[in-house]
Image (spheres, coloured by chain):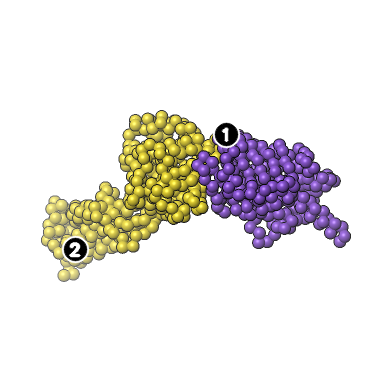
Amino acid sequence: MGLFSEESNDATKFVKKMDELYRSNSSYAEIIMKIETPNWKRSLKIKSWSLGNKRSFLRILEPKKERGIATLKIGNKMWNFLPKIDKIMKIPPSMMMSSWMGSDFTNDDFVKMYTFVEDYDFKIVNLKDEKQDNNIVYIECIPKKGRPIVWGKRMLAIYKSSSLPLWEKFYDGKGKLVREMIYKDIKKFGNKEIPSVIELISTTKKGNMTTIIYSDAKFNIDIDKKTFSRKNLRKRI
Amino acid sequence: MIFKIAFRNIFRQKRRTILTALSMLSGFVLSAFFIGFSDGSYSNIINMFTKNKTGHIQIHQKDYLDNPSIYKSISKYQIIFRKFDKIKGIESYTPRIYTSALVSVRDKSAGARIIGISPEFENRTTNFNLNIVKGGKPLSKNNSKETLIGIGLSKLLKTKIGEKVTIVSQGADGAIAYDEFKIIGLIDSGDELADKMAFYIHFMDADKLFSLKGKIHEIAINTKNIRSVDMIKHSISKSINNTELTVATWKEFAKSFYDAMKADQAGMWIMLFIIVLIVAVGVLNTVLMSVLERTREYGVLKAVGTKPKQIFSLVLIEVNIIAIFSVIIGTGIGFILNSLMAKYGYNIPEPISYGGMMIETMKGEVNLRSFVIPAITIFFTASFVGFFPALRAAKIDPAKSMRSF
């Protein structure tokens, strides 16, 4: 029994770390997003801000054609700003599972209302098909009843030593693997270590891959609440 | 000789002849009218669905229909269009671009199907402008960032003519495609589901917005006669000679609709069979009666040396002469009836919805098969049911039969 509770404490520790990994209390980051599909390839340069898990803000800097397009999220609401026509557009709930700016990320990934700690049941599991390593722990996370979460299950592979993730797999309600996130290149930004490269591979769309590369990041800094406003959304850069 | 006797027999007993003829005639007219009417109704529904909407024939990139995507496009469509001019039987054709987008007005948003059309070609092919609700205008001839939106979509967005709609989607190059379009009219295509999604823009606007670089997704073609659609499809495939493209007729791309039509028509044949059965029983009855009535006569004929074979033919010839008259007169009546039905139709008191289309009038049709099929069945049943009384007449024992009266 003692062993069991120790293990579940461990699991809590790991998923808590996952919840805060790219967020902390507040964050600022400069990101390159590379999107590859069988039909085209493109690369976006993005700046992002977040405050708690309620507020986040993203703005595209490059390419030129899309410069100034911004996304604001407050709670579970999301808006896009379209500079060419000077319009703010609210993303309807029905579009939450649609692609964000043509990437393999969905709008829902940015809203990210749910945390492992509060909204999932999780436990450490043995995965016979995966690499057996004393330093790697596998955690199975299943949404708690009543949460409108689209995933049937999420599997995490985490390094015990650093509590940093190795990969994450997303399964749909029927238990089919839908997408895979691979975390790479652990880097230190300020005093926080994070995997600086995230590869998102869609298993349903063949040949599609989105890579996020952190070129700069700051955590637990002071961010003005006004950053997360419609006014800031409209700001020309 | 036998013909002469047959004619005499026919005119001698006018009442009996008229009775037989009447049962044949009414059977003929009933089936001719029934076939004409149901053929007409089906042609009308099929026409509403194909000619005014999908076209009789469509061209797409391979497996576009199974799994549509903005990338599965037709390039150099102008070259294909030029080839159409040399193919006989093509009446009109129109290019189309399809993609989906998020559309919004003020704080209302909805998912929409963006349909890029050539205002001129589309109207020439499908009479598109007839779908514009009163108060709206057709799209301008040149691209102008105007839109016609489905009446259902306008309700979802709570918008009206004159307002601007923002559309956001992704171009074929992956970039975010967005722009504003001014609503100049609403579309009521009769297909409620489609009208909840429909967002029509000029195909050149769509080309620019979605970075399609001169590519389109669909060519819809109307033929001069829907019955020759398979032949024309064949000519088109041969002429464009491109394995990347598929040419399909409405029977293929609207398979569920086609199957429903076929199932309904199977029902028509069952009805027709029942009508023919009733006619056959009527004819059998009158012919049998007339043979029984004339048992003595046949006996006399036999007694003076008429062969059984001759008597057999006599009865059959009589029946068939009546059948010929009935068919001739019936064709006249059926033609008038079907022409009237084709012209005026039958107004259904409660319009019915079929495959998303509202049907208000059922119209008949004048075609060859609505006369040929009943004529064949009448002759066939006349001979078939005449066979047994004729056999009976041929077998009559003259001595016995003459004694019976």
- Between B51 and B179, the one lying in front of the other is B179
- Picture coordinates of residue B72 (x, y %)? 51, 37
Q: Look at label 1 and name its amino acid.
A: Lys
Specify whether disc 2 shares its chain with disc 1.
Answer: no
Picture residue at 80% right of the left edge, 42% below the top = A191
The colour applied to the residues of chain A in this rendering is: purple
- Between B310 and B132, the one lying in front of the other is B132
Q: Quadrant of the N terminus of chain A?
A: bottom right
- Residue A52 placement, left or right of B171: right
- Tag 2–tag 1 contact (CB < 8 Å): no
- Picture coordinates of residue B141 (x, y %)? 36, 38
Chain letter for mark 1, please.
A
- Picture coordinates of residue B83 (x, y %)? 38, 30
The residue identified by callout 2 is B19
The residue identified by callout 1 is A64
Picture residue at 32% right of the left edge, 53% below the top = B41
The residues bearing labels 2 and 1 have C-alpha atoms spaced at a distance of: 90 Å
- Between A144 and B186, the one lying in front of the other is B186
Chain letter for mark 2, please.
B
The residue mark sitting in front, 2 or 1, is 1
How many numbered discs, if any? 2
Picture residue at 71% right of the left edge, 46% below the top = A27
Picture residue at 16% right of the left edge, 70% below the top = B405
Which element carries disc 1, helix, strand or loop? helix
Q: Which mark is residue B295?
A: none
The colour applied to the residues of chain B in this rendering is: yellow
- Picture coordinates of residue B243 (x, y %)? 48, 33
- Residue B69 placement, left or right of A204: left
Q: Look at label 2 and name its amino acid.
A: Leu
Which element carries disc 2, helix, strand or loop? helix
Q: Quadrant of the C terminus of chain A?
A: top right
